[in-house]
Image (cartoon, coloured by chain):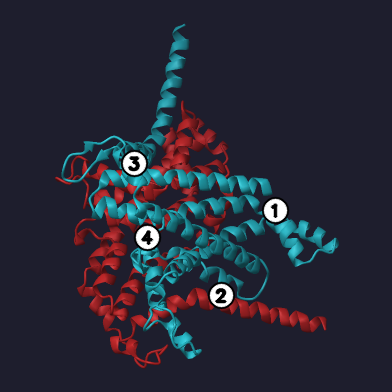
Chain colours: A red, B cyan
Amino acid sequence: MCEKSKRLKLIGIYVLATLILIVYLGPYLWMFMTSIKTQADVMMWPPKIIPDQLYLKNYIDVFSTNLPRAFLNSLIVATTSVIINITLSSLAGYGFARLKFYGKDTLFMLALATMMVPPGLLVVPLFTMMKNMPFGGANGWLDTYLGLIIPFAVTGFGVFMMRQFFLTIPMDLDEAAKIDGANKFIIYSRIIMPLAKPAVSLVAIFSFLTQWNNYLWPLTVARSQEMYTIQVALKAFQGQYNINWPMIMTGASVAVLPTLLIYFTLQKYFEKGLAGVGTGVKE
Amino acid sequence: MESRRKQRNVIYKDHLTSFLFVMPAMTFLITFALIPIIYLVYLSFFKYQIPNPAEFVGFKNYIRAFSDGLFWKSLLNTLVYTVGSSTIGLSGALAMAVFLNRQFKGKRFYKVMYFLPTVTSEVITAMIFLWIFDGQLGILNYFLRVMGNTDPPQWLLTTPWAMGVVMLVGAWRGISYNTPIYLAALEGIPKSLYEAADIDGANGWQKFWNVSLPGIIHTLVYTIVMAVIGSFQVVAIVDVLTNGGPLDSTLVSIKYIWRQAFEYNNVGYGATLSLLIVPFLLVFTIMQLKISKRRA
């Protein structure tokens, strides 16, 4: 009896697990399956879950749209943001965690406060600011890489995460290096940063994903098709091909690729990062 | 005397170089996150239609906003979406985390898979669901027809289904995002507490209510606040799924603000509307904090 109920319970677990899997993986598989179908295949009744033949021409056709350009734009925006964020956040994190200076607490509170500012509310004032930025054209930084990258390049989350990590490294390291005659920048760059790989990876991943997946800001600041990022271009693509589902799903499959690549190769950092987000912000 | 002054100079210099470490990042954060908030207040008092110069209009934008039915409708839609998607998303995530907090074969695989929606953009997620929920060719309606429903809904073209789908997509992402957070919190609860409950003869539910829930209450509050603030700014999902329709039933605040500011070129009015949703965000946050504090 006990054996039996135990087995029933186990079966229950796997049934539930399979259901979850269908709900969570199914949509992705369906996207991919549609992307390798012809338009005629999609119109068929009853629909074929798996098409009779692989139709890969969609993936070639996508190249003659403006998606490749947008893909490249997103790569430029996301990688530049990562580099800026890692450099500046780690410097600031080091300052907040291990150095003394007047106004440190106030500044750190300000950095934390920026994490609470809803980005959706910033779109209108940032747009006007960008329009009036110097060194652009008549439209300031609108429709430029600068406008796409700079406003959201440095994140409060980055500064906060780097600081939290640097707090866990023993201060003895700095003391020893100081006695050896190293200055603060040498200590930061030669001793602390090489130890910070987990924090750097985490901030890099989140920066990249946020920028890659961002929609509202690029939609606002990119005025011409040439400056569209991949998400904005996909949305425009949807309008253009609204009856051609295979094509739309091909575009979506291509756009999701870099994020999946990053996720699957750097998966171990994600859980750590999110666990930290949920429990660490209390401070 | 002389040496003390020197010493003070050294300290001053030391503080200055330390300050330089945080300066670059803080310049970015202050310029692009804090100043825009102040600028938003300033802009809200102007009529600003690019390329015309901004023209001071006092409280005119505010007066206009109060009689702007569509704005209040968008706010109501946003509230409905926020409550719906947060409730489903967070309770779903909690259920999922409790489920995954036990040992079974292949658990690792599940933990990797259910997180996919979080790394996928809202635009792509919404596109996939747009295709699934398509009235004519969508796979969902195919299954419904097979199961005998001859006239399944045109999900995204009729009210109130459209809002329901938008909510579900939001919740689908919410479950994905919050599950690992809850899971980490659950794993942090000492095993001894569960053992003690076992000795007292507690069943699964009792253990959940008396051990698990109090153990993750801080995490719970944090995720509620974040979910509300996040949902309040939903726009990409709506843009792709319904573009605000049908009959403005999924027109959410940020979408309406964006329309006013950038499609109708009323930048100043857009600023006013942005500012007007701040109190709702604040009230929501404070309310949630109070409720959860009382429970704790």
Separation of residues labelled 4 and 3 (CA atoms): 20 Å
Kind of residue indicated by mark 1 = Pro
**Picture layout, residue A104 above or below residue A239:** above
Q: Which mark is on residue B251?
A: 4
Q: Marks 1 and 3: in contact by CB < 8 Å?
A: no
**Picture layout, residue B148 above or below residue B17:** below
Q: Earlier in the sequence, mark 4 or mark 1?
A: 1
Q: Position of residue A282 (x, y in %)?
A: 58, 44
Q: Position of residue A7 (x, y in %)?
A: 73, 82
Around disc 4, counting alpha carbons within 10 Å, would you say few (fewer than 14), some (14 to 19), or many (20 or more)?
many
Dividing the image into 4 quarters, which one contains the C terminus of chain A? top right
Kind of residue indicated by mark 2 = Ile
Residue drawn at x 65%, y 65% is B98
Q: Which residue is mark 2?
A: A20
Residue placed most toward the observer, B43 or B251: B251
**Picture layout, residue A210 above or below residue A255:** above
Separation of residues labelled 2 and 1 (CA atoms): 26 Å
Q: Which residue is mark 1?
A: B214
B152 sits to left or right of B184:
left
Residue placed most toward the observer, A69 or B260: B260
Q: Earlier in the sequence, mark 3 or mark 1?
A: 3
Task: Say whether residue A126 is visible.
Answer: no
Q: Marks 1 and 2: in contact by CB < 8 Å?
A: no
Task: Say whether residue B99 is visible.
Answer: yes
Q: Which residue is mark 3?
A: B62
Around disc 2, counting alpha carbons within 10 Å, would you say few (fewer than 14), some (14 to 19), or many (20 or more)?
some
Q: Secondary structure at mark 1?
A: helix
The reply to the same-chain question for discs 3 and 1 is yes
Residue drawn at x 39%, y 89% is A47
Residue placed most toward the observer, A48 or A35: A48
